[in-house]
Image: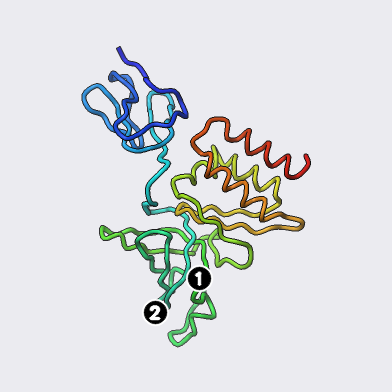
Amino acid sequence: MSEILVENKTVVIPGEILAKGMDYLPGENTYREGEQIFSKSVGLTSISGRVIKVTSLSGPYKPKDGDKIICKVFDITLSGWRLKTNTAYNAMLNVKDATRRFVRKDEDLTKIIDVNDYIVAKVIRVTSQKLIDLSMNDPDLFKINGGRIIKINSQKVPRVIGKQGSMVSMIKKFTNCDITVGQNGLIFVRKRDNGNECLAEKAIKLVEKEAHIGGLTERVETFLKSETNQ
């Protein structure tokens, strides 16, 4: 007889049995042995129909194609920029992937993006040696100006975003800030008129701290309402 042994949004550890029987399917961060499904990592369970998966709450960011990340330039070469990615691996942004306009061979690349600048970019290639190629050729990718950069555990990013963007949308609403969440755990916050970057950072840090506890959305909403007298 098939049976799920954990509840939805339960914290589990590696090797913990999540389900028995062949009626259920292993999803992300889970694996099957015989008729049992186990967790691969420390994380929160998510049960959707017959599929059970675990959203990891620990471990480093693992870059993959299509991820939006926030990076810091540390070197400029003849062909582009080298960037830190908040991981053990650096990234490369070639000139052709940084801007749609024509760039002369002798052009000063610091006028486009300089050392110590942060950018929002997309991962377009990850090699077997974990070399990362980036692109900025999408409308929602840009060089960062102003605001602040917040660093969190990259495994908590899904909780900061929330289901269909619900959590980050709520934080934007109460703080009147633009927020860009990088999958690598760096988050860009910039206030609009009368916005509160400090409150946005506090809310994000609250999500990171309590990501493993149920009722998170309600607690964050209560916190934001109390801080904004609503």
Q: Could you tell which of marks 1 and 2 lies nearer the N-terminus?
A: 2
Dividing the image into 4 quarters, which one contains the C terminus? Answer: top right
167 sits left or right of 4 in the view: right
Q: In the figure, residue 86 lies in which quadrant? A: bottom left
Mark 1 is on which residue type? Arg
In the rendered structure, find residue 115 and report the number of the disc placed on it. none
Compared to residue 6, the image places residue 213 above or below, namely below
Compared to residue 10, the image places residue 103 above or below, namely below
Nearest to viewer (mark 1 / mark 2): 2
The residue drawn where x is 24% and y is 21% is: 35
The residue drawn where x is 76% and y is 58% is: 193
Mark 2 is on which residue type? Thr
Circle 2: is it few (<14), some (14-19), or many (20+) Cα within 10 Å?
few
In-front residue for pair 168/10: 10
In-front residue for pair 184/137: 184
> What distance separates the C-alpha of mark 1 from that of mark 2?
19 Å
Residue 41 at x, y percent in the picture: 34, 38
205 sits left or right of 76 in the view: right
The residue drawn where x is 34% and y is 25% is: 18
Compared to residue 36, the image places residue 150 above or below, namely below
Dividing the image into 4 quarters, which one contains the N terminus? Answer: top left
Question: What SS does tag 1 mark?
Answer: loop
Residue 205 at x, y percent in the picture: 57, 48
Residue where numbered disc 1 is placed: 100
Residue 8 at x, y percent in the picture: 46, 26
Residue where numbered disc 2 is placed: 77
